[in-house]
Image: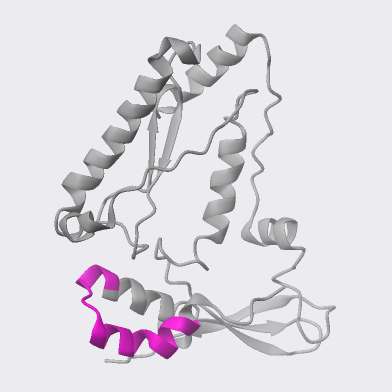
Amino acid sequence: MKRKYEFADVFRKYGAEYKKTHAMNDEQRKVMAAIMACRTARLGGHSEVCNQCGTTNNSYNSCRNRHCPKCQTMTKEQWLDKRRNELLPCGYFHMVFTLPHDLNPLILANQRELLTCLFATARDTLFAFAADPQWKLEGKPGILTVLHTWSQVLLPSRFMKIRYYGFLANICKKKAVLLIHRLIGKYMRHNQLIKETLQEKVLRLTGKDILLCPHCRQGKMMYRGELPALNTS
């Protein structure tokens, strides 16, 4: 079911006023502009025509910004497919580490240093609990950390949202997961990652055929020609 409103609609309606009343850096402004332009005539695209009824349609390009909800849907699904193949037959726990809001201005001015410190502190805290004899845990926990900021969804440039430690570290993850299954005597059936076209993936996930003519529901939308990006400068 298509959403009545999208993220871009909020930016279009309130973005200009927000920029007047809030301090925004260049990266935040670029992301806002990209999301508003995503899949609109501003980015160009191509025209399509139905091979049955002749209906024409314009399909516009994506902004491909990593913060754009539209562009990241397929990437998210691919990421989830890979993560499912890494699950172990054991319990998983969701833990939240929260900082005092009084530190917000300080962290905003020193994001790389203090966010790195936050991740390291969370890791060390979990390792300390795991090493406590009263918890009766063996080995170190595998940790997947996700940053949720208090007032922004944008990460500092080149700062990754996901951090892995322990057996989930990228350098040893593949071998470590197989070894853990072997040691505990429970082998998980791995799902074969499906190689799909964009059309096939959207059809599997949403039941919608993106090439099906929206008018006659019989023909296929075929490439007709390029649509140049609008020059808004």
- Prevailing secondary structure of the magenta residues: helix
Magenta residue span: 9-28
The image shows residue 79, relative to residue 157, as above or below, that is above
Q: Is residue 157 left or right of residue 39?
A: left
Q: Is residue 224 left or right of residue 134?
A: right
The image shows residue 77, relative to residue 83, as above or below, that is below
**Rendered residue at 41%/63% (across/down):** 67
The reply to whether residue 171 is in sight is no
Does the magenta-highlighted stretch encompass residue 27? yes
Q: Is residue 85 left or right of residue 150?
A: right
* Depth check, front residue: 74 or 28: 28
Q: Is residue 109 left or right of residue 165?
A: left
**Rendered residue at 49%/18% (across/down):** 175
The coloring applied to the image is one colour
**Rendered residue at 18%/61% (across/down):** 105
Q: Position of residue 53 (x, y in %)?
A: 80, 88
Q: Position of residue 69 (x, y in %)?
A: 50, 66
Does the magenta-highlighted stretch encompass residue 10? yes
